[in-house]
Image: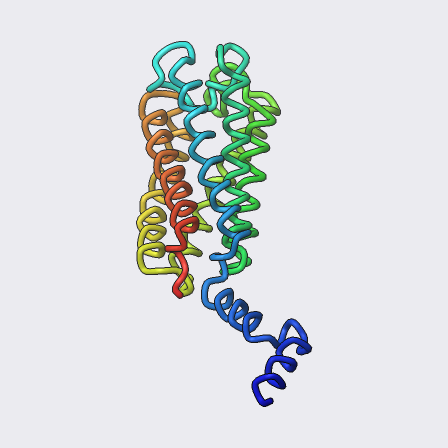
């Protein structure tokens, strides 16, 4: 009789008060990005970041001249044979950044804002390509699109660095996740500063090209690894 009454009590209890609902809520509280939605978002982020970066790399390799000289964005100018592919690759990468922000939102809303902002700026950079050889002051005459493209790229990278630092300082993430983010931050900040100074005082050339490519490798590596760790539910302490 007691067992039957207990069964009826569980059946008629509100959904939020049932043991299975409380267990599910407890699991989500311990592992907020381990939900089906979180895994789907992180899987989409991994795909978008990796595939987008590969498309950009193919376009860069096939751009006129040595792919180790000039700015990476030159692969998206009108003279490049795969300019459209490059811009679509950058848009896909930008979507991956935003998707990662959505996947990490339960653990940190600040990351949603930072990664969403970085994704928007990357998309702006793709939508507003620079002109041939991406001329920048004070060494060359420039256009409005050159300034908009470059400003979106620089600010977007700075915002991404802020996202890396946020992960490194957020205790909800695992040691591996935070350590990887810290290493990425330590690398990307001086690389970005050196690239900015090179663009300002030296202009377009081999030094700036190498610095930019190393910086982008660090950024894409962090995005891909963070998305993968999130997909594997190895980013949040449980």
In front here: 152 or 120? Answer: 120
Residue name at image x 41 percent, y 19 percent: 58
Image coordinates for residue 204, horizontal then vertical, percent? 40, 21
Q: Which quadrant holds residue 189?
A: top left
Establish if 4 lies above or below 175: below
Image coordinates for residue 146, horizontal then vertical, percent? 56, 24
Image coordinates for residue 162, horizontal then vertical, percent? 46, 50
- Color scheme of the displayed model: rainbow
Residue 190 vs residue 16: left or right?
left
Residue 128 vs residue 35: left or right?
right
Residue name at image x 36 percent, y 25 percent: 209
Q: Which quadrant holds residue 234?
A: bottom left
In front here: 220 or 197? Answer: 220
In front here: 77 or 224? Answer: 224
Quadrant placement of the C terminus:
bottom left
- Count the numbered circles shown: 0
Establish if 32 lies above or below 207: below
Residue name at image x 47 percent, y 23 percent: 73
Image coordinates for residue 141, horizontal then vertical, percent? 53, 18
Establish if 20 lies above or below 219: below
Residue 116 vs residue 160: left or right?
right
Residue at the farthest front position: 1
Quadrant placement of the N terminus:
bottom right
Residue at the farthest bottom position: 2
Residue name at image x 41 percent, y 29 percent: 199
């Amino acid at each position: 009789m007691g067992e039957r009454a207990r069964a009826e009590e569980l059946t008629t209890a509100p959904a939020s008060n049932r043991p299975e609902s409380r267990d599910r809520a407890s699991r989500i509280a311990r592992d907020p990005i381990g939900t089906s939605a979180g895994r789907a978002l992180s899987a989409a982020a991994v795909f978008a970041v990796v595939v987008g970066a590969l498309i950009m790399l193919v376009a860069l390799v096939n751009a006129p001249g040595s792919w180790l000289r000039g700015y990476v964005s030159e692969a998206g100018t009108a003279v490049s044979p795969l300019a459209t592919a490059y811009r679509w690759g950058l848009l896909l990468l930008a979507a991956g950044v935003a998707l990662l922000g959505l996947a990490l939102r339960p653990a940190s809303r600040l990351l949603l804002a930072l990664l969403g902002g970085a994704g928007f700026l990357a998309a702006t950079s793709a939508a507003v390509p620079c002109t041939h050889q991406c001329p920048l002051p004070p060494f060359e005459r420039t256009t409005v699109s050159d300034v908009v493209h470059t400003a979106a790229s620089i600010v977007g990278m700075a915002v991404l660095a802020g996202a890396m630092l946020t992960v490194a300082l957020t205790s909800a993430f695992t040691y591996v996740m935070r350590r990887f983010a810290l290493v990425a931050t330590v690398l990307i900040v001086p690389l970005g500063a050196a690239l900015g100074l090179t663009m300002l005082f030296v202009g377009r050339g081999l030094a700036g090209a190498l610095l930019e490519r190393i910086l982008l490798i660090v950024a894409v590596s962090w995005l891909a690894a963070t998305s993968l760790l999130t997909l594997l539910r190895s980013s949040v302490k449980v």
